[in-house]
Image: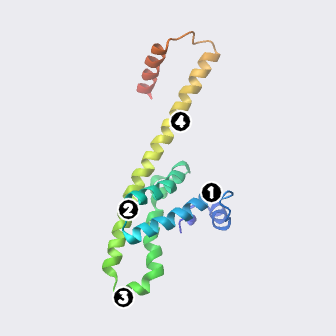
C-alpha cells in the first residue's frame, strides 16, 4: 500500500528490486515499516517508533510529495490490519484492541507530520544557504566584493537573512 503512493513506474521498481543497494528507498521503507508495526502492536518505546518513522519521512520529505501525501501511508496501516485481521477481529470481538491500535496510529500520524515539517524546513534552509553562497561567489567573481572583514560579512549576511 505504501509503495502504491509512488508513480506507477517507481512503485513497480520499488516492489520488484530486492537489492538494498539498487533500491535503498524500497529497502528502507520495508524495514522501517516492519519495525513501526511491531512497536505499534506492542505499544512499546515511542522513541524507537519516532526513529523508525524518521527514516521514512526523511525520504518522502525530499521527494515530490505534499505534506498530506507524505504522511498518508501511516493511515494505510489501519487498512492493512483490517484486511489481514478482519475475521479475527469480528470473531474474537477484538474491537477494543483495534480501537487502541488505531489510536496509536493516529498519534503516529501527528508525529509523522511534525517530522515531515522539520525535514522540509531543513531542506529550505539548505536551499537558502546554497543561494547565498552562489550570490556571494558571483559577486566575488565579478569583483564587486573587495576585501571585506568578517564582521562586515556577518552584518551583510544578517541583512540578507532578514530579507529572505
| Residue 69 in sight in this render | yes
**In what element is the residue under mark 2?**
loop
Residue linked to disc 4: 127
Q: Residue at x 49, y 56 (%)?
A: 70
Residue linked to disc 2: 45
Residue linked to disc 3: 92
What crowding class fits label 2: few (fewer than 14 Cα within 10 Å), some (14-19), or many (20 or more)? few
- Pick whichever of labels 2 and 1 is earlier in the sequence: 1
Which image quarter: residue 48?
bottom left
> How many numbered markers are drawn?
4
The correct choice, above or below, for 91 with respect to 49 in the image is: below
**In what element is the residue under mark 1?**
helix
- Badge number at residue 32: none
What crowding class fits label 4: few (fewer than 14 Cα within 10 Å), some (14-19), or many (20 or more)? few
Residue 21 location in percent, x, y? Answer: 67, 57
Which image quarter: residue 39?
bottom left
Amino acid at each position: 500500500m505504501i509503495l502504491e503512493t509512488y508513480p506507477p513506474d517507481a512503485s513497480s521498481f520499488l516492489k520488484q528490486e530486492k537489492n538494498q543497494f539498487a533500491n535503498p528507498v524500497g529497502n528502507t521503507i520495508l524495514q522501517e515499516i516492519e519495525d513501526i508495526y511491531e512497536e505499534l502492536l506492542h505499544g512499546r518505546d515511542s522513541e524507537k517508533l519516532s526513529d523508525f518513522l524518521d527514516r521514512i519521512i526523511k525520504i518522502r520529505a525530499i521527494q515530490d510529495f505534499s505534506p498530506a501525501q507524505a504522511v498518508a501511508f501511516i493511515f494505510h496501516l489501519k487498512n492493512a490490519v483490517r484486511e489481514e485481521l478482519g475475521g479475527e477481529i469480528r470473531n474474537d470481538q477484538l474491537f477494543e484492541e483495534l480501537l487502541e491500535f488505531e489510536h496509536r496510529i493516529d498519534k503516529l500520524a501527528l508525529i509523522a507530520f511534525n517530522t515531515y515539517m522539520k525535514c522540509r524546513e531543513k531542506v529550505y534552509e539548505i536551499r537558502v544557504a546554497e543561494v547565498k553562497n552562489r550570490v556571494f561567489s558571483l559577486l566575488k567573481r565579478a569583483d564587486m566584493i573587495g576585501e571585506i572583514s568578517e564582521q562586515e560579512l556577518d552584518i551583510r549576511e544578517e541583512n540578507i537573512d532578514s530579507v529572505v
